[in-house]
Image: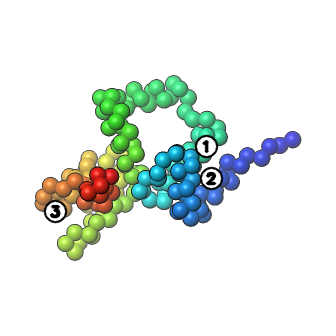
Amino acid sequence: MTTHDPIPARLAALKTAPTPELKAQWRELFESEPPPFNRRYLESRLAYRIQELAYGGLKPETVRRLERLGEELDGGDRTKRSARADMMPIAGTRLIREWRGCEHIVTVTADGFTWQGRPYKSLSGIARAITGTRWNGWVFFGLKNHRRGG
């Protein structure tokens, strides 16, 4: 007797589900409000979570190894690490901002951002290059509302 695995069908359904349905699934699977990122981000995180719940997550030794690597990167500041992971758009995302009649396109990379063919570690550096003044890059590119703080 063969058993039917419903997970592949659930994953395929993410591609055609309306965005409000993706957000509802997020609330159910993560027990939190969905982040304000693009549809592709929601789909990929939901797909991972569905598989994680069905088949199990990472092995404990893998989690420990990742935590050690994270500590090497940020000195063990878990708050900074989790905020960065939750806030950062996925690599390949394009951020578009018009400034004084000129459209600026920034691409998110695995280790930062690129703008006009040059790598940058922060969005604030790009915003400063565009405007000539100090800006919070997340606010400048519309990823964070400076009045709400998130």
Give the residue displayed 68% in from the left and 54% down from the top: 9
Q: Residue at x 16, y 62 (%)?
A: 131
**Marks 2 and 3: CB-CB under 8 Å?**
no
**Callout 1 touching callout 2 (CB < 8 Å):** yes
Rendering coords of residue 97 (x, y %): 28, 66
- Residue at label 3? 131
In what element is the residue under mark 2? helix
| Distance from Cα at disc 2 to Cα at disc 3 | 42 Å
Q: Name the residue under label 2.
A: 11
Q: Name the residue type under label 3.
A: Thr
The residue under the point 67% across, 48% down is 7
Q: Label 2 neighbourhood size at 10 Å, few (<14), some (14-19), many (20+)?
A: some
Secondary element under disc 1, as helix, strand or loop, is helix
| Alpha carbon separation for disc pair 1 and 2 | 9 Å
The residue under label 1 is which amino acid type? Answer: Gln
Left or right: residue 144 compared with residue 9: left
Q: Which residue is drawn at 71% across and 49% down?
A: 6
Q: How many angstroms separate mark 1 from mark 3 (CA)? A: 44 Å
